[in-house]
Amino acid sequence: MKMERVRRAIVPAAAAAILCLAASGALAAHQQEEQGAKKGAAAAHTPHGPQFAVPKPPFSPGIFPCSDCHKEIRPNPTRRDLKDEHTNIVLNHAQGQRWCLDCHDTANRDKLRLASGERIPHEESYRLCGQCHGDKYRDWKAGVHGKRTGMWNGEKQYLLCVHCHNPHDPAYKPLQPMPPPVRPENVRK
Amino acid sequence: MKKIWEFFKGTLVLVTKGSKAYYAWAVSLLVLMAIGAAAYVYQLQNGLIVTGMRDQASWGFYISNFTFLVGVAAAAVLLVIPAYVYKWKPIKEIAVLGEMLAVSAMVMCLLFVTVDIGRPDRFWHLIPKIGILNFPQSLLAWDVVVLNTYLVLNLVIAVYICYKNYNREEPNPNFFNPMILFSIPAAVSIHTVTAFLYNGLAARPFWNASILAPRFLASAFCSGPAFMIMLFQVIRKYTRVEIKDEAIFKVAELIAYSMFINLFLLGAEVFKEYYSHTIHLAPMEYLYQGLKGHSDLVPYIWTAMFFNVTAFILFLVPQTRENYVTLNIGCVLIFIGVYIEKGLGLVIPGLVPDVLGEIFEYSPTGTEILVSLGIWATGLFVYTLLLRVAVPILTGEFYVGEDGVKPVIVDTEFIRKADALAAQSYRD
Amino acid sequence: MPNQESRDSQAFRMSRRKMMKGVAAVLGAMALPEKDAPASVWDAFFQKNFRELSKPELEKVIARLEKEYSGQYGKAVKVHATPPIEGVLYGYGLDLSRCIGCRRCAYGCIQENNQSREPQIQWIQVLQLNKERGVDLEEAELYYNPAKVPEKGHFYMPVQCQQCERPPCVKVCPVQATWKERDGITVVDYNWCIGCRYCMAACPYGARHFNWKKAGLPAAEMNPETHYLGNRPRPVGVVEKCTFCIQRVRNTPGRYTACVEVCPVGARKFGNLLDPESEIRYVIENKRVFILKEDLNTRPKFYYFYAT
């Protein structure tokens, strides 16, 4: 009897799965990245690839757009420790190998820069992170690394990597836990 | 029909008549029952929060008492087998007392379950057809069925024997023998089903041991008969019922065998758990040694062990078994020993440590103890009333009159002083 | 297990009400509902098991409950009875390499699911475990309370209802007050449960909780969007448990469970096990998962995994 019930559940599921497969076969021409996008129903297509529904990047107040200050300043591409500005930023993220202008675009400070030289907006910063953290990027697109909210069977919202990880110091910071439950000994009438 | 009605009226007259000692005994039980009822009303108003139970230990004193009393009830079979299967006369004369004990113990069992459930107002959900009894999946449903069957069976048997005796007739074997024979597997089944109720829970390794049901039966055949031996002596002393020494000693001998099996099975279990030393040892460690500084049950279980072993020796050696002082000491020790071992000693380690490893030391609250006292008083009260009718029937002091309808009541005292009894000559 | 159709068609349904009316006098003498109690009290008393309610009966029950709760909490409370979505079997993933033991999930759950605040009922128990000992529940600590988590040398394992495919709690219930729905969620009919707590003894995960006392749920904090089988207010003396936020996840589209939404590290994953594109299927395909107490063969649909 139990088998019957399982079977009843499986038949429509299998039918649905076959339909899904057929549909995805027709769309096989799409890029692999599309797979991730499909799961986030909100994903829209841009010339550079899929874009995920994400909230605004968590800029420090008053810091963006960067060009407000930087359009007046001639870029200095020499690798160095910053002494006059941004002194609060301590790079604790592969600091031996990289510095500011490896990620921030030299010519357009409002954009980020991929290794390929492509300029991307901060809203797509996950592509920058994904250059090194490919496994996390893959999981993130599937909704498995990081947090995804919204509808489990509908529109979903992603968080950018930088919503949880400070890009300059990405280790997740410890939190104060919520109070422990009341011990049964202390549950009184 | 009129005859039965007259008999019934006669029993009502009987239970209201008695010596001062009878009234005092009955009234003190009624007072305890009233206190228990008041405590239960308090529990109903406030919820089970007034007990010591919590999510971590979700069963406690009530279910412990229930489990113990199922054993007491099942033990009636220990009188039935020699009496009716082997037709051993000394026990046959008193087997009805065992059946009435089973009835009283069943009443207590059902009351203990009732006070334990969170929604007694939804009791009707358990009634087949009207509610939904999850039979045969749930062992609790099985328990509901077998406990009620056993209660009705023993009540019918006891009433039938009494009624036939009252009419000075022999029981009709075509009706009586099948019932008696059926009561034997029924007694085994109530205890087996109650054991399986725990046994079937894979989540609780302490209970999930195949040895549980045999152990249940073995310990049941110790505690119930021990109670009966003491009771027989009281009955024999304060009423005119004659109970032969050899009947008492035979029961004591049976206790010795049962206790041997009980201890042997316990040893088998202890060996398996301690030698293999898996994570499933934790509850047993908690019970016998204490776990991580929690050792509330340790003194109790060692008391029980000491009592059981001592009683076993007392019952095994013929000299101490047939000496009323040592015999009674043995009975008290066994009754307390099994009460601990099979009550809290069985229920609590099943739940502590809990399934996520938490240790919460349960202990019953005053409310639980008062409610339980009330239920014990109720059981004793039921038993007293049953005896009040049965004893004069057995002694021939309550019987149907010459006209074959009206009852004759000779016994108006029931509980008499021992010396007064001795002074009177025994009515033939 | 008898299937739903055959039980639904049993004839005794028709006669139950009639029979119970007869018994009513006896039970009335037992001072259950007061003699002059409003009709709704009697309706509640005679209410049938959820699975045996016809559509009009269910509507009546829901109207009565909504009225009762709305009066009690001073706001418009909705009680839904949304059925399972076809082709959905819910599954849950919990990433032990991410969980930091902050207990946000336990408290998010309380708010969403209207658990009693006083005495406290928590459907999610977060265990602190030793990295050296692994998942050794004898070493688990439920009451850890450092200034910051995670603590060195420890990892954390939240435990809640594992929504077993073979739930031992369902098997043992003497009155079928708890059952597994077609979408795999094990639910309780709080109006049918007799409070015997056998299911609590049977559950290997400590997932079931009892209302030892009338629930202490402040009206202001009461979540008025409820489901009959989920987060509606529970009466005293019955058992309750996690339902994967049945009031959310059965909608189309349906929100993620509250614990998924509230988890600050994204350790919690939820989806349809029958959908190869779901994140829970991704977890099962791409990560190494384990289920708790697999030797008991309860077959949980709650998968613990290590993403890294």
Image (tube, coloured by chain):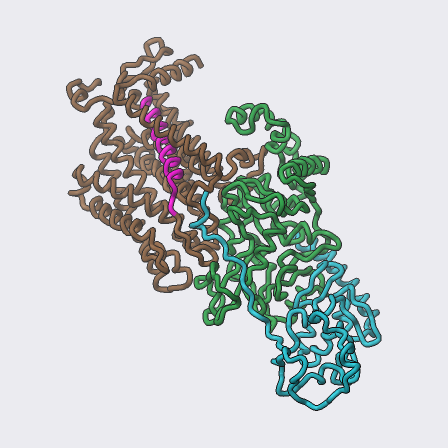
Chain colours: A cyan, B brown, C green
Q: Is residue B101 left or right of A181 when viewed as pictured?
A: left
Residue positioned 31% across, 50% down in the render? B301
- Which is the main secondary structure of the residues drawn in magenta? helix
Q: Is residue A49 left or right of C28 when viewed as pictured?
A: right
Residue positioned 45% across, 58% down in the render? B357
Which sits in the foreground, A150 or B291? A150
Which sits in the foreground, A44 or A67? A67
Which sits in the foreground, B263 or A111? A111
Question: Is B315 rendered above or below residue B104?
Answer: below
Does any portion of residue B109 appear in the rendered image? Answer: yes
Q: Position of residue C256 (x, y in %)?
A: 68, 57
Q: Which residue is most to the bottom? A: A78
Does any portion of residue B285 appear in the rendered image? Answer: no
Quarter occupied by the C terminus of chain C: bottom right
Residue B376 belongs to the span the image colors magenta: yes
Please tell me how many numbered marks the rendered image carries: 0
Quadrant of the rendered image containing residue C173: top right
Residue A157 belongs to the span the image colors magenta: no
Q: Position of residue C82 (x, y in %)?
A: 71, 47
Q: Position of residue B137 (x, y in %)?
A: 54, 45
Question: Is B423 rendered above or below residue B275?
Answer: above
Q: Position of residue B69 (x, y in %)?
A: 37, 39
Read off the magenta span: B363-390
Q: Is residue B168 left or right of C196 when viewed as pictured?
A: left
Quadrant of the rendered image containing residue A148: bottom right
Residue positioned 48% across, 61% down in the render? C145
